[in-house]
């Protein structure tokens, strides 16, 4: 997208992937705005202060990024952010800023669950002036969205506002304010607001974001104008809509923004490492390590700062395969023998399911073995064997491998082996993570080998949850395992 229009291609980036994504977007002709000081130092370019058309922020668990902004910009950014074969993405069903008449389905000690039609949001009682009961309809706006693989829910509020990145209009009267710790810059910006010739609509108050303190008069005027137009549009929609209490089912009313979530797998992280390495010193597995734990993230920063320009930059072996010092990282941060590690089983539709935790019984230079004692009831998938109390599941996860085996044992007998095909495994200090690719290979206790669930993989492709290149990789791995077993 060389020569992209800055007015429609401006991105604000935050989180552990910022340097890599800044390189990615700049190379594609985008404008990166509201850049942090480290980013300003690393890139030989000007970072203008203008309103972003999208924001790209690392998720709280560092697994990927969430993108919010104008629908067209989000769609164009999606093509850029699919950086590797194991990047998966999903549309945000409740983007920030959406206004919805939802139904209260449950109340908790500090808030209520609200059916939004597309998913369930959370309304803290502090965010509503009225008492709410189960079954009531309530008009809410999405303040914060939530990645589909987390246990979080979209955060809701009953105060309706509009925002253009630099300027926010709040539903209250009063003088303009600035969200910044720089008191002098805030006073100057408030004074400049009167010179813009743009007034907030009746019943709305202007709140500038910190980045606005560095913006030009033209940029400020444009951002405020767009906020006013958006507020007028929203007011018209709400004026024409019946009261929420008159509805019986959730109804979407207003959505200026779109959103999308991106899950970065292990191979995608190494692609991002390469982008970052083109800008600054980057250890092998930089993003892979940072995803694991806060202490690991700080350790990477320290190591890279100490290495500086003396770092050799070698990141692959003689066969061109990405190197990653798993044993060194695991020695420093875990997991270790005896630790409890959760199995984070990602699904192609965006969910992350825990298969339970196991005890680390062995760990070598590239793998972790977990043992779980199982309870009775039901049967083992595809093995057609009843599950009994005391059965043991032994699972070995090898860092970076596209599959992992689980051996089911009862006393001294092997009931069977279930080999799960998935995106490359990542073994973090307290969890193992991957995305299941449906197709599996089973080795029964009598030695018979069976391949299952190809139809589920095809359904995931048809649903556009798995792209064809990833599906073909899964089929290839399954075929190789069939032959090997």
Image: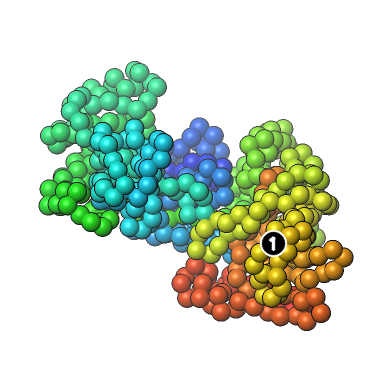
Colour mapping: rainbow
Where 387 sits versus 116, above or below?
below
Q: Within 10 angstroms of label 1, few (less than 14), some, or many (20 or more) residues?
A: few
From the viewer's perspective, tell me whether residue 272 is left or right of residue 328: left
Where 21 sits versus 456, above or below?
above
Q: Report x, y in % for residue 269.
A: 62, 53
Q: Is residue 473 visible?
A: no
Viewport quadrant of the N terminus: bottom left
Please name the residue that numbered disc 1 is placed on. Answer: 376
Q: Report x, y in % for residue 298.
A: 65, 34
Q: Residue at x 51, y 76 (%)?
A: 459
How many marks do you count on the picture? Answer: 1
User: Which image quarter: residue 61?
Assistant: top right
User: Which image quarter: residue 216?
Assistant: top left
Q: Report x, y in % for residue 367.
A: 78, 55
Q: Secondary structure at mark 1?
A: loop
Viewport quadrant of the C terminus: bottom right
Q: Is residue 467 visible?
A: yes
Q: Residue at x 25, y 49 (%)?
A: 137
From the viewer's perspective, tell me whether residue 17 is left or right of residue 104: right
Q: Residue at x 84, y 63 (%)?
A: 411
Q: Residue at x 46, y 37 (%)?
A: 35
From the viewer's perspective, tell me whether residue 316 is left or right of residue 148: right
Q: Report x, y in % for residue 234.
A: 19, 47
Frontmost residue, 12 versus 114 = 114
């Amino acid at each position: 997208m060389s020569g992209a229009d800055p007015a429609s291609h401006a991105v604000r980036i935050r989180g552990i992937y910022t340097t890599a994504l800044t390189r990615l977007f700049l190379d594609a002709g985008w404008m990166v705005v509201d850049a942090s000081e480290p980013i300003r130092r690393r890139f030989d370019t000007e970072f203008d202060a203008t309103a972003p058309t999208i924001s790209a922020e690392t998720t709280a668990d560092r697994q990927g990024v969430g993108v919010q902004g104008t629908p067209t910009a989000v769609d164009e950014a999606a093509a850029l952010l699919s950086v590797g074969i194991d990047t998966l993405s999903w549309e945000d069903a409740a983007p920030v800023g959406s206004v919805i008449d939802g139904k209260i389905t449950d109340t908790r000690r500090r808030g209520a669950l609200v059916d939004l039609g597309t998913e369930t949001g959370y309304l803290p009682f502090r965010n509503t002036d009225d008492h709410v009961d189960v079954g009531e309809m309530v008009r809410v706006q999405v303040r914060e969205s939530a990645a589909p693989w987390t246990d979080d829910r979209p955060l809701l509020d009953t105060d309706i506002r509009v925002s253009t990145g630099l300027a926010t209009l709040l539903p209250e009267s009063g003088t303009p304010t600035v969200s910044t710790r720089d008191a002098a810059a805030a006073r100057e910006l408030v004074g400049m607001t009167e010179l813009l010739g743009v007034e907030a609509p009746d019943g709305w108050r202007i709140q500038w974001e910190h980045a606005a303190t560095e913006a030009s008069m033209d940029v400020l005027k444009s951002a405020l104008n767009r906020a006013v137009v958006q507020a007028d549009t929203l007011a018209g929609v709400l004026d024409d809509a019946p009261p929420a209490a008159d509805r019986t089912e959730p109804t979407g009313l207003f959505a200026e923004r779109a959103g999308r979530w991106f899950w970065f797998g292990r191979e995608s992280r190494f692609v991002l490492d390469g982008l970052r390495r083109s800008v600054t010193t980057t250890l092998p597995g930089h993003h892979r390590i940072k995803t694991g734990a806060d202490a690991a993230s700080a350790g990477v920063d320290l190591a890279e700062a100490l290495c500086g320009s003396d770092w050799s930059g070698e990141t692959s072996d003689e066969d061109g395969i990405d190197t990653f010092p798993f044993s060194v990282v695991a020695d420093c941060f875990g997991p270790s023998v005896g630790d409890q590690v959760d199995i984070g089983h990602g699904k192609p539709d965006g969910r992350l399911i825990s298969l339970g935790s196991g005890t680390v019984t062995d760990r070598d230079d590239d793998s972790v073995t977990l043992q779980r004692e199982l309870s009775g009831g039901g049967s083992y998938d595809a093995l057609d064997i009843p599950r009994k109390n005391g059965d043991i599941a032994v699972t070995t996860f090898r860092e970076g491998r596209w599959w992992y085996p689980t051996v089911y044992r009862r006393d001294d007998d092997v009931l069977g082996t279930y080999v799960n095909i998935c995106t490359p495994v990542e073994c973090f200090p307290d969890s193992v993570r991957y995305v299941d690719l449906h197709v599996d290979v089973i080795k029964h206790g009598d030695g018979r080998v069976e391949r299952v669930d190809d139809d589920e993989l095809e359904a995931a492709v048809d649903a556009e949850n798995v792209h064809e290149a990833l599906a073909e990789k899964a089929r290839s791995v399954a075929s190789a395992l069939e032959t090997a077993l």
